[in-house]
Image (cartoon, helix red, strand yellow):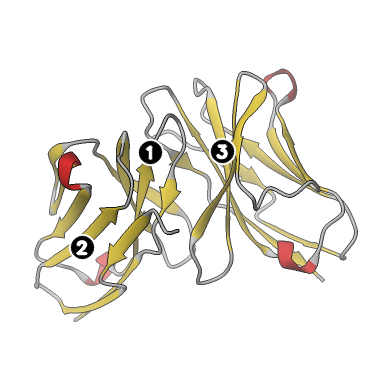
């Protein structure tokens, strides 16, 4: 079936540094999402993105977060600067207008 | 508040038994989706089910919009069904909110 690829699978970073999480969505999909899941806890919506713009973001999407997809390349989530509470698994998802979400395998971010 | 309530929070079954997982929504829904989250964390879409009943092998999903609920039925459970089952609500357009999940353990 359709696949969303996330790179890297695991990222370890020192608090205060910048990190960029990369997502390669399904090729014909138009809507892109980031979700955050702390180990053993609920999947939390961060942001969705369509036609080059953020459509909706949650209160978890802090000012230190940003997303973009320059020229059809990776859909990225950038955190600058990182904080300890940013440690989590970040899942990327994509969909067509028919709404079925397809998820990547996640990037485990560890902020030390 | 919590828009999506899942029950039970956890469930232990003997292999071969059936399971019924529930998802209730506090807001009206445009659509909803059921996912299986593997112990390693990746998610697999089981059903995109805005209304009515859908079948896939041993799985059946039923969504009743006016009652703001959806159920996932697993028949003849197997040990490989163990994991977390998540439901996600789409209240508006192109945005999904997740419940806390049902952790299923099937023992041989």
Callout 2: chain: B
Describe the element under mark 1 as helix, strand or loop: loop
Provide residue A111's location: percent of width, then percent of height.
78, 66
Please state if B99 lies on the left or on the right of A42 as rendered.
Answer: left
Q: Confirm whether circles 2 and 1 share one chain.
A: yes
Question: Measuring 50% from the left and 57% from the top, which residue is drawn there?
Answer: A43
Q: Residue at x 39, y 53 (%)?
A: B3
Q: Disc 3 marks which residue? A: A33
Give the residue at mark 1: B91
Q: Are marks 3 and 1 on the same chain?
A: no
Identify the secondary structure beneath mark 3: strand
Residue A5 seen anywhere in this rendered image of the structure: yes
Which residue does the image show at 79% across and 46% down from the upper left? A63
Q: Is residue B63 visible?
A: no
On the image, numbered disc 2 is attached to which residue? B21
Where residue B91 appears, as percent x and y from the top left, is 38, 38
Tell me the crowding category of disc 1: few under 14, some 14 to 19, or many 20 or more residues within 10 angstroms, Cα based: some
Per the model, the C-alpha gap separating discs 2 and 1 is: 20 Å
What residue do we see at 32% from left, 52% from top?
B26
């Amino acid at each position: 079936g359709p696949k969303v690829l996330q790179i890297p699978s695991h990222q370890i970073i020192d608090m205060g540094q910048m990190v960029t999480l990369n997502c390669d969505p399904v090729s014909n999909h138009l809507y892109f999402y980031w979700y955050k899941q702390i180990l053993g806890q609920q999947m939390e919506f961060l942001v969705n993105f369509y036609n080059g713009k953020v459509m909706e973001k949650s209160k978890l999407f802090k000012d230190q977060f940003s997303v973009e997809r320059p020229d059809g390349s990776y859909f990225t989530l950038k955190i600058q600067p990182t904080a300890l509470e940013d440690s989590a698994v970040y899942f990327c998802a994509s969909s067509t207008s028919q709404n079925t979400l397809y998820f990547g395998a996640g990037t485990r971010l560890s902020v030390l | 508040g919590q828009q999506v309530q899942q029950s039970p929070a956890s469930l232990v079954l003997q292999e071969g038994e059936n399971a019924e997982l529930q998802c209730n929504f506090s807001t009206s829904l445009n659509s909803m989706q059921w996912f299986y989250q593997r112990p390693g964390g990746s998610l697999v879409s089981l059903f995109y089910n805005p209304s009515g009943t859908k079948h896939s092998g041993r799985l059946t999903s039923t969504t009743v919009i006016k009652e703001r609920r959806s159920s996932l039925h697993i028949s003849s459970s197997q040990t490989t069904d163990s994991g977390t089952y998540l439901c996600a609500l789409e209240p508006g357009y192109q945005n999904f909110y997740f419940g806390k999940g049902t952790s299923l353990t099937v023992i041989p």
